[in-house]
Image (tube, helix red, strand yellow):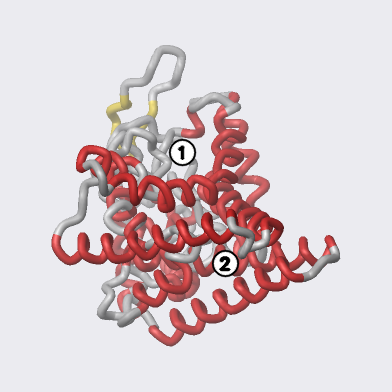
C-alpha cells in the first residue's frame, strides 16, 4: 500500500521568524479509498430531506411562538434556545442546496426559501454561486476564497471579534433587505455594490461576487423581492405596533443566537492555517475538521452533516445523510497511518483551544 502522507521537498517561503511550511501532496491511496468506498452513497434521499426540513421548521417556529407568548423568564429562555437550535438546523440546509442537483430533490429549494430563506432573510442565492468557490482546488485558502481567513495566524483579539460581531447579523439582514434592496433599484451603480458586497455569506472582506445570469438571475430577483417585502413589512408592522416590540426583540435575539452558534461552528470548521498558497486536496482535508461520534453535542452545533466538514471537502457531492456511513467505511478502508484519521477531533472545547493557542504562537 502507498505511503499515507507524501510531502514535497520544497518548503514554501515564509515571513522572517516563521518556520518554513512544507507543502502536502495529495495522498492518492486515501483519495482512491474514499471514492471507492462511497460510490453507492451519492444519491440523495428526498424523503430524508423533506422530513428533516419540515420537522426542524415545525419545532423552530413552534418554539418561537412559545417564546413570544409565555411570560415566565425561564420558559422564554428555554423556548428561545430550542427555537434557535431547530431554526439553525433548518437554515443549515442552505449548504445542501448549494451542492445538490435540484432535479434530485424537486421543489426543495423553493420550499426552503419560502419556509426558511425568506422569513430569516437568508435566501439561497446568498450561498449559491459563492460556496462552490470555497471548494475550488485553486481557490481554497487563498485571497479568492470567500469563506477563508487565516484566523490561526491572526492576532488573538480577532477570534472574539469574529464571533461577537455575528450577533448583529439579524439587524444587518434587515438593513440589507428593507433598505438597501429598494434603494439599489434607484441606481445601477449602487445596485452593483449591493450585489457584489452585500449578497453573499462570506467571511473574506475582500470577496466580490459576480452577478448571476439567466435562470439564476431570475430566481435571485424573485426571491430577493420576497425577502425585501418581508423585511419592510417587519419594520413597518413593528413601528406601528402591530408586532409587539417585545416579540420582535425575542425573535431578533433568537436570530442572533443562530448566527453566533453558526459563527462558532465556522471558527472550528477549519484549522485556518493557510496563508494564501494553493493547497492540494489532501492539504485542504487536513486543514478541515471532522467531529465524529461518540461526541453527541456536534449534532446540535454542527447539524446537517457539518460535523463531517473535512470529509465533505474530500467528497463534496455526498448528501449530508450519507456522511456518517461514508466516514465509517473510509475509516475501515484506509490504513492506520492514513492522513484520513488526522482530521478527526474530539469536540468543540479542544478545537477552540487549538485555534486560540495558534493565534498566540503562529507557525
Q: Residues within 10 Å of mark 2 (few under 14, many from 20)?
A: many
Residue nearer the viewer, 313 or 333: 313
Q: Position of residue 31 (x, y in %)?
A: 31, 59
At 67% across and 47% down in the image, what residue appears? 349
Q: For this rendering, which residue is in front, 163 or 139?
A: 163
Query: For the view shown, which residue lies furthest in the left direction?
Result: 214
Report how far apart the C-alphas of labels 1 and 2 lie in the structure: 27 Å
Residue 272 tag number: 1
**Is 337 above or below relative to 163?**
below
Decide which of tag 1 and tag 2 comes sooner along the chain. Answer: 2
The residue that mark 2 highlights is: 87
Quarter of the image that includes the N terminus: bottom left
Q: Nearer the viewer, residue 61 or 147?
A: 61
Residue 139 horizontal/vertical position (percent): 27, 42
Residue 173, position in %: x, y?
A: 47, 50
Q: Is residue 3 above or below residue 327?
A: above
Q: Position of residue 170 (x, y in %)?
A: 54, 51
**Point 58% across, 48% down: residue:** 264
Circle 2: element type: helix
Amino acid at each position: 500500500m502507498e505511503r499515507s502522507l507524501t510531502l514535497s521537498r520544497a518548503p514554501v517561503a515564509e515571513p522572517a521568524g516563521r518556520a518554513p511550511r512544507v507543502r502536502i501532496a495529495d495522498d492518492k491511496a486515501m483519495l482512491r479509498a474514499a471514492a471507492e468506498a462511497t460510490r453507492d452513497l451519492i444519491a440523495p434521499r428526498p424523503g430524508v430531506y423533506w422530513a428533516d426540513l419540515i420537522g426542524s421548521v415545525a419545532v423552530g417556529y413552534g418554539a418561537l411562538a412559545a417564546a413570544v407568548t409565555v411570560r415566565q423568564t425561564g420558559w422564554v429562555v428555554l423556548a428561545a434556545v430550542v427555537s434557535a437550535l431547530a431554526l439553525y438546523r433548518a437554515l443549515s440546509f442552505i449548504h445542501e442546496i448549494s451542492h445538490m442537483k435540484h432535479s434530485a430533490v424537486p421543489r426543495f429549494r423553493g420550499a426552503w426559501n419560502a419556509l426558511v430563506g425568506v422569513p430569516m432573510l437568508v435566501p439561497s442565492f446568498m450561498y449559491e454561486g459563492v460556496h462552490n468557490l470555497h471548494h475550488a482546488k485553486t481557490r481554497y485558502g487563498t485571497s479568492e476564497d470567500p469563506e477563508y481567513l487565516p484566523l490561526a495566524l491572526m492576532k488573538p483579539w480577532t477570534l472574539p471579534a469574529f464571533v461577537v460581531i455575528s450577533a448583529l447579523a439579524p439587524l444587518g439582514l434587515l438593513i440589507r433587505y428593507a433598505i438597501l434592496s429598494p434603494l439599489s433599484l434607484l441606481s445601477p451603480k449602487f445596485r452593483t455594490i449591493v450585489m457584489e458586497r452585500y449578497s453573499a455569506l462570506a467571511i473574506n472582506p475582500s470577496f466580490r461576487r459576480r452577478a448571476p445570469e439567466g435562470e439564476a438571475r431570475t430566481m435571485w430577483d424573485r426571491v430577493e423581492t420576497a425577502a425585501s417585502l418581508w423585511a419592510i413589512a417587519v419594520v413597518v408592522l413593528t413601528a406601528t405596533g402591530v408586532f409587539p416590540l417585545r416579540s420582535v426583540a425575542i425573535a431578533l435575539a433568537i436570530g442572533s443566537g443562530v448566527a453566533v452558534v453558526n459563527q462558532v461552528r465556522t471558527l472550528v470548521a477549519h484549522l485556518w492555517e493557510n496563508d494564501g498558497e494553493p493547497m492540494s486536496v489532501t492539504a485542504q482535508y487536513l486543514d478541515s475538521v471532522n467531529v465524529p461520534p461518540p461526541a453527541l453535542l456536534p449534532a446540535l452545533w454542527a447539524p446537517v452533516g457539518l460535523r463531517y466538514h473535512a470529509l465533505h471537502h474530500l467528497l463534496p457531492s455526498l448528501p449530508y445523510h450519507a456522511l456518517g456511513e461514508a466516514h465509517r467505511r473510509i475509516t475501515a478502508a484506509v490504513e492506520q497511518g492514513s492522513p484520513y484519521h488526522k482530521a478527526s477531533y474530539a469536540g468543540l472545547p479542544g478545537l477552540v483551544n487549538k485555534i486560540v493557542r495558534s493565534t498566540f504562537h503562529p507557525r
